[in-house]
Amino acid sequence: MKTIALRIVLLCTVAVLTACGSDTPTSTVDTDISRGTLVDNPPFRIASVDAATLGAQLGASPSGAQLLQVTGPPACGVDFNYMHYWTVNASPTGDVAASGSAALMVPTGASPNCSGPRPILLYAHGTQTDKSANLADITDPNNSEGALIAAMFAAQGYIVVAPNYVGYDTSNGRFHPYLNADAQSKDMIDALTAARKALGKVLANTTTDNGKLFITGYSQGGFVAMATHKAMQAAGQPVTASAPMSGPYALEAFGDAVFFGNVDLGSTIFTPLLTTSFQRSYGNIYATTSDVFEDAYAGSIEGLLPNAVPIDQLIGSGKLPQLQLFHDTVWATGSAQLNATLNVPANPLFALGFGPANLVKDTYRLAYIMDALANPDGAVPTQTNLLPAAAPGSTLRQAFALNDLRSWVPTSPVFMCGGENDPVVFFSVNTQVMQAFWTYVAPPASPLLVSVLDVDSAITGPDDPFLLAKGGFAQTEAAIDAAAGGGAAGLQARTQTYHTTVAPFCSAAARGFFSQF
């Protein structure tokens, strides 16, 4: 999300701000560490900005002005509160208490759409390598995702609850449970519980919960949003609707696709996040990191991410390769079909994931693939029953299958959004596989409960309900191409930014979807 270059610098010394965190009333401190406990009540208010000032701050930069074209002008002011709460983290022996932090964005203003009873928007953020990331800190010019959800949702009348996740910011979690569906959904639910305790006690105390709950998130957050909807439904907790966006929902199918050679951009970041998460959650991914990773990286890779050191510096210092997940070995296994599976793919995008400075060992990749061939996923490499493998032997595939979201059927509306050419989270392997699962394998009570948008699809006509999202995405892609000079350079620029370019247009479509309820 960092490529959305929004800069809203809201400092307490700026006179135009309505109020700042320093005027937060005295909080009471709760020493209870049970799930959902709000530590400081009310939470600290970092900044407050009225609708006109927020619009002016956004409109002052070209990128902010472009965002306003997607979000529309702010209808409400926003109070940015910084919330601390207790949740849990995973371990091989069960849940352990962990602290968490979150943004609580409360709409303000005289309009009835900005105060009084308002819906809650529970937001899950995308993959973040910066351990200090804090969505509540709108004074941080790097907090582009916080700015996006503030403009898209809070400034349009939604109370936004956005956890930073265990393992980030001030959390005492010893690792981040990346794509652990159980742990991450508990974190989300506990942040929501704590936020509901704060509402009515924050400075914007006339803005309260009207009982409607919407869940959304992008990329990693798309997975977390769907996992949270699933967990809340199973617990009998009402969800009005959810909009998971560009998430790796069919996790085993996606993992298999990557190991078969369809290497996604960002795989050298996602892989250590995943292996650390699953190793510390389940304890069985490897005996030592050298079982999985080349010696050049194995010594420091467990727990390397998230990190306070910028990812470019970690790559530059040799802690991680930039793109090369697998070695560019010329395989001679005795099976032409297996050799074709293992060798560098012809697709130039996937081929970027191969080279001599690779992250994952050949031996580990071969063992993974042999298990995937012996215990195939029902969607990759061939669509059969669309289900995860019944009994995978690889412990990494077991973890993928355990956290794969082809395991539930929604009873309230779900809207999935993404882009068909996404090189980071493959649309066909995730969104379309989930859609097919809910269509052919485990259909909900009504087919109308699940809807899907590909923002990169053709506009069907002037009555297309997603005309603005599709048109805006196409225009942005054209502008990126033109700025890079078109041709091969334009293609490269569009590929590198595609995943983040989709985000605001899917978010706008999600907001439109939520407005129906």
Image (spheres, rainbow, N blue to C red):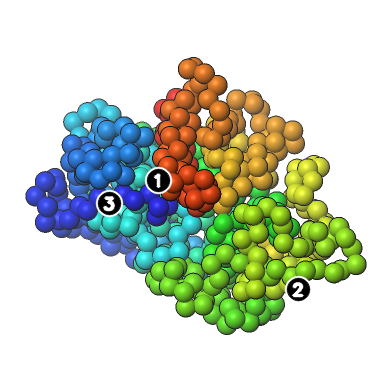
Helix, strand or loop for disc 3: loop
Q: CA distance from mark 3 to mark 2?
A: 46 Å
State the mark number for residue 7: 3
Q: CA distance from mark 1 to mark 3?
A: 21 Å
Quadrant in the picture for residue 82: bottom left
* Dot 1 and dot 3 residues touching (CB under 8 Å): no
Quadrant in the picture for residue 11: bottom left
Identify which residue is drawn at 58% across, 50% down: 423
Q: Give the number of the mark in front: 1 or 3.
A: 1
Indicate the quadrant containing the C terminus: top left, top right, bottom left or bottom right.
top left
Identify which residue is drawn at 84% across, 61% down: 338
Q: Is residue 16 visible?
A: yes
Residue 502 appears at what percent x and percent y? 48, 42
Q: Which residue is mark 2?
A: 363
| Of the pair 123 and 467, the residue shown nearer to us | 467
User: Pointer 2: residues within 10 angstroms few (<14), some, or many (20+)?
Assistant: few
| Of the pair 332 and 159, the residue shown nearer to us | 332
- Decide: is 255 above or below 277: above
| Of the pair 496 and 233, the residue shown nearer to us | 496
Residue 76 appears at what percent x and percent y? 24, 35
User: Pointer 3: residues within 10 angstroms few (<14), some, or many (20+)?
Assistant: many
Pointer 1 or 3: first along the chain: 3
State the mark number for residue 483: 1
Helix, strand or loop for disc 1: helix
Q: Give the number of the mark in front: 1 or 2.
A: 1
User: Pointer 1: residues within 10 angstroms few (<14), some, or many (20+)?
Assistant: few
| Circle 3: residue type | Arg
| Circle 2: residue type | Thr
Residue 412 appears at what percent x and percent y? 55, 32
Residue 154 appears at what percent x and percent y? 32, 40
Pointer 3 or 2: first along the chain: 3
